[in-house]
Amino acid sequence: MRAVGAVLLLVVLATTVATGARRWRIPAPSLLVLAGLAVALIPGAPALHIAPETIGLVVLPPLLYASAEELSLRDLRSVWRPVTVLAFGLVLASAALVGALAAALTPLPAAMAFVLGAVLASTDPVAVTALGRRLALPGRVQVLVQAESLFNDATSLVLFRVAVTVAVASGTVTWQAAGGQFALLAGGGSAIGVAVAGAVTLIRRRTTDPVLETVIALVTPYGAYVLAESAHTSGVTAVVVAGVLLGRSGHRLTDARIRLQLHAVYAVVVFLLESVVFSIVGLELPTLVRELPAGSGMWPLQALVIAATLIALRVLWMLPLSAAVGPSRRRPSWRIATVVSWAGTRGVMPLAAALSIPLAAEDGSGLPGRALVLVLTTAVVVFTLVVQGLSLAPVVNRSGLALEPEHTAREEEQARKALTRAGLAHLDQLADLETIPGHVVDRVRRGLEAKLEHDNEPVAGTPALVVYRELRHEVIAVQTTELRRLYDDHRISDTTRRQLQRDLDLEETGLGTA
């Protein structure tokens, strides 16, 4: 009962703080971490211990799935080369540099220093997505940051498992063994993700019940994660692959009513889980600090140096790659390199990995340095979420990369006009065929022309209501096809596509059953 009460209290606190963050226009993850720190520092506050399995199984799958569904597969194709370089090269370089730095600056043994480097080597997709939702970045830049955080998990997870094996068993791991483990984790996780996406697609094509669709959507990430972990592959990779594939085809598997319901349900789930999980990050740090052994008082400075090193390395690594995502695609850009580097925060996944470090070595002795690794990991996570999170929007605005609100509004307006013209062209074809009463066609045409002229007044007269609804549904289907064509032809962004698709869904739902 006490655990249930603690969870409810945490949900209330996180929801209250997140609501305030929206009102004050402060990134919710940053404010939630600060709130968690403040609560944990209250005298008499109970210590918080979170099992890594709880974060890995309960929290991560739906958040990763939601992030993957938001990823634009079209834009991903344009940045797959820099994403691959970052997901492999930067992760390896970060792990090596942080490991060497930790071995030099901290009392950690070399093996545990490498564990710390592996834990902090990759950016966190949950934090990156949560912080990036409010930013109006160009499509390729936004996708680069988000895709890198989603696809660098397999690399960092292999490094982490290798490092833990060395630390626990005091043995050596060959490059062949590490390569085989990476192939198993990344390849096996990807295969299971594809299989889950295929199975879910077959099921959803035969399902029209909104309740069943919602249940399937909520179970899918957990199913992919559990299946992959049971097969000793990467559950995170399986969830990401399934999310990207289903996000690409989801609009063809459901109707407008179901899409709107799924959007509403997942918005609630993501809001609650993000609110709770970022609060936990802040709550964990004071508890871990109290458990530090004597002689670890320099951890704040050590964490600051490690965080600054990660950011500096990321800027230098990203600079030559920025040419691939810049407007000109010719020369590197310090502005893009700085924004992408500042957006690459650490978050929940490094914390979950650090918590999963074994308590003892194979000989039964305590694992030296485990407490310090936990504290340094959590401190770096807190630093990136608070410092980078609170300053990310100003950095983006000063860089000049942020899209002006007028740009988004103009693109959306042009796309709406294109959809309306597509609907009118379809009505002209129907009028020529004379298969539908002329007054019904005229009524639908007047409604579309009113939208084209920004006139939202209702059209008078309601004869042949059933035929009218059928025709409106048919026109909306034509507009949906046109919307997909505009997106595939790179004439609109993924953000505009999602907004207009939601508007069409709302309009179609408002018509009722055809």
Image (tube, helix red, strand yellow):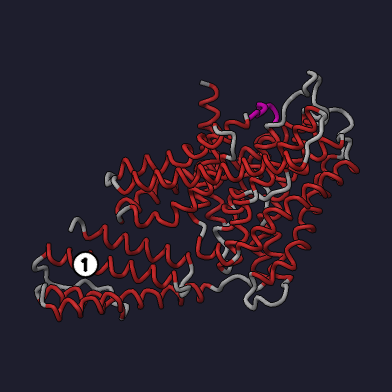
User: Looking at the image, which residue is at 64% across and 59% down?
Assistant: 83
- The residue at 46%/72% (across/down) is 492
Kindly identify the amino acid type of the residue bearing the numbered disc 1: Arg
Residue 419, compared with residue 14, is above or below; it is: below
Q: Residue at x 75, y 32 (%)?
A: 165
Q: Quarter-wise, where is residue 115 in the image?
A: top right
- Stretch of the chain drawn in magenta: 42-50
Q: Which residue is mark 1?
A: 472
| Residue 44 shown in magenta | yes
Residue 352, position as x, y percentages in the image: 65, 37
Give the residue at the far top of this rendering: 364
Hey, which quadrant is residue 108 in on the image? top right
Residue 250 horizontal side relative to residue 233, left or right: left
What is the chief secondary structure element of the magenta stretch?
loop
Q: Residues within 10 Å of mark 1 (few under 14, many from 20)?
A: many
Work out whether 199 lies above or below 406.
above
- Residue occupying image coordinates x 65% and y 28%: 49
Expressed as whole percent of the image width and height from the top left, the position of residue 118 reads 74, 43
Quick check: 294 above or below 214? above
In magenta segment, residue 21: no
Could you tell me which quadrant the C terminus lies in? bottom left
Query: Of 473 and 188, which appears nearest the observer?
Result: 188
Where does the image place residue 461, in percent across and percent down from the top left?
11, 71
* The image quarter in which residue 142 lies: bottom right
Looking at the rendered structure, the secondary structure element under dot 1 is helix
Q: Is residue 182 left or right of residue 376?
A: left
Tell me: 426 left or right of 281.
Answer: left
Circle count = 1
Residue 198 location, x and y as percent? Answer: 41, 47
**Would residue 305 appear left or right of 185 to someone viewing this image?**
right
Q: Residue furthest front?
A: 176
